[in-house]
Image (spheres, rainbow, N blue to C red):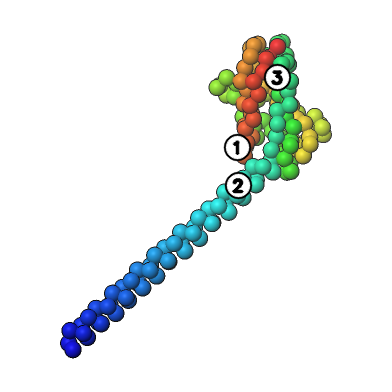
Amino acid sequence: MIYLASSAMSEIVMFVAVLLIAAFVAGILTTSTYKISLNINKKGDALATKLSQDFEIINDPGDIVRNSSAGTIALYIKNTGKDPIIFTNDSFTVIIDGSIVEINTTNQLTSPGSNILSPGDVGEIVVNYNETGYHRIKVISECGISRIIRGYIS
C-alpha cells in the first residue's frame, strides 16, 4: 500500500509541475504576441504617415533644365499624398550622383508665396549644380520619403 500511495503522489506532483510549465509557456506566448501586435501598430502608423505625405519628381528626365549663368538646376515635385508637405529649403535634401547639393530656393508654383505643398500642388526646388550630362538625382523629404530620377541635365 505504501508503494501505491507513493506512486500516486509522484504522479500528482508531476501533473502539477506540467500544469505550471504549461501556464508559464502560455504566459510567455501571450506576452510575446501582445508585444508583436503593438510593434505592428507602430510600424503601421509610421507607414501611414509616410504614405500620406508622398511626392513625385515630375521633371522630364530627358531634359532637366539648367541655368548655366546662375549655376543652378530646377527640380519640380508634386505632392501626390493626402496631407500637406512643408516646402522649405530645410525640409528637403537633394543628392546628385552621391553628393549632397545645396538647395538655393524653394518656390511653391501652385500657390506662390506659400511654404506648404497641399495635395496636388507643384513646387520647384532650385539647387546649386552646374554640370551637364546624365545624372542620378535623389530628393529626400524630412519624413524620410525619397524619390530618384535619372536624367540628362542640359
Q: Please report whichever mark, 2 or 3, sits nearer to the chain's N-terminal start.
A: 2
Residue that sits furthest to the bottom in the current view: 1
Q: Which residue is the site of mark 1?
A: 144
Dot 2 lies on which element? helix
Dot 3 lies on which element? loop
Q: Give the residue displayed 18% in from the left and 89% down from the top.
A: 1
Q: Residue type at mark 2: give it.
A: Ala
Q: Which residue is the site of mark 2?
A: 46
**Comparing marks 2 and 3, which lies closer to the viewer?**
3
Q: Please report whichever mark, 3 or 1, sits nearer to the chain's N-terminal start.
A: 3
Mark 2, Cα crowd under 10 Å, few <14 / some 14-19 / many 20+, is few
Q: On the image, which quarter does residue 126 sit in?
A: top right
Dot 1 lies on which element? loop
Q: Residue type at mark 1: give it.
A: Gly
Residue that sits furthest to the left in the current view: 2
Q: Please report whichever mark, 1 or 2, sits nearer to the chain's N-terminal start.
A: 2
Residue 64 at what x, y percent from top left?
71, 17
Q: Which residue is the site of mark 3?
A: 61
**124 relative position to 22: left or right:** right
Q: Residue type at mark 3: give it.
A: Pro
Residue 108 at what x, y percent from top left?
77, 31
Q: Quadrant of the C terminus?
A: top right
Is 128 rendered above or below residue 27? above
- Asked if the residue under mark 2 is in contact with the one under mark 1, i.e. CB atoms within 8 Å, the reply is no
Is 83 rendered above or below residue 90? below
For marks 2 and 3, give the CA distance. Answer: 31 Å
Mark 3, Cα crowd under 10 Å, few <14 / some 14-19 / many 20+, is some
**Comparing marks 3 and 1, which lies closer to the viewer?**
3
Q: Give the residue displayed 62% in from the left and 39% down from the top.
A: 143
Q: Is residue 96 visible?
A: yes
Q: Give the residue displayed 39% in from the left and 65% down from the top.
A: 25
